[in-house]
Image (cartoon, grey):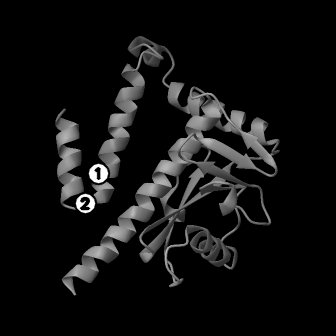
Amino acid sequence: KELEIEMRKSSRSQNFEKAAEIKQKLDQISYITSGKYKPWQYEQNPNLVSDRLTKETDDLKELLGLEKLGKIECYDISNISGKLATGGQVTFINGQPEKKFYRRYKIKLENGPNDVAMMKEMLSRRLKSDVPLPDLFVIDGGKEHLFPLPIPTIGLAKRLETIYYKNKIIQLPLNSPALHLLQRLRDEAHRFSRKYHFYLRSKKMLE
């Protein structure tokens, strides 16, 4: 409860990095106390969490038929009616966030709210970067957000957690390790893009 109060205070003061760190702690506590494993099991195997990450990555790799799945990038767009639109790119390596590879985008498109066009702009700019490409792109959105890219790309639609990959529609059970990894990626990209969007909104109001 103390951590939850501290997280809300950090969020209200727009200290989003601290709020995210506290949320990660809360998620870990929830995971340990969720009943999936008993606390004494962590004493016997301190690598339970890393084993879970490996399981999630291996399941996703098998699901998509990929030979390698070490580095994944996920993308999300934040805007209000197309105004002050921002994009967030987060990177996971071996199932863990790698924040030094995160990147934020100020969307240049000004033709009203068009998430598909905004996503296309962000990914086009990413492809022009000198940073090596990942093994997989994950896009927060449905089939309409996908367009031809040089590496495997999937869309994850929020409402029913539907996965779009190539010409396939995949619906995983909610307890799927692969889905858990994709949800963590999507949620982190959403948090990161919203953080930049709120920053621009605050700056605009001050001006």
Element under disc 1:
helix
Is 203 on the left or on the right of 77, as rendered? left
* Residue 136 vertical placement versus 196 (above, below): above
> Disc 2 designates what residue?
15
Label 2–label 1 contact, CB within 8 A = yes
Q: Is residue 85 left or right of residue 203?
A: right
Image quarter in which the N terminus is found: top left
Q: Which residue shows up at 38% across the image and 70% down it?
A: 197
At label 2, the amino acid type is Asn
Q: Nearer the viewer, residue 110 or 126?
A: 110
Q: x, y percentage for residue 194? A: 39, 63
- The three-letter code of the residue at mark 1 reads Ala
Q: Within 10 Å of the Cα at label 2, are there few (<14), some (14-19), or many (20+) other Cα atoms?
A: some
**Numbered tag placed on residue 19 in the rendering:** 1
**Between 115 and 62, which is closer to the camera in this rendering?**
115
Disc 2 is placed on an element classified as loop
Q: Position of residue 143 (x, y in %)?
A: 69, 55
Residue 81 seen from this side: yes
| Residue found at the far bottom of this picture | 207
Binning the other alpha carbons within 10 Å of mark 1 as few (below 14), some (14 to 19) or many (20 upward) gives many
The answer to whether residue 166 is above or below residue 38 is below
Q: Position of residue 77 (x, y in %)?
A: 50, 65
Tell me, for residue 46, which label it has, or none: none
Please name the residue shown 82% across and 50% down the image: 167
Image quadrant holding the C terminus, namely: bottom left
- In which image quadrant can residue 152 be found? bottom right
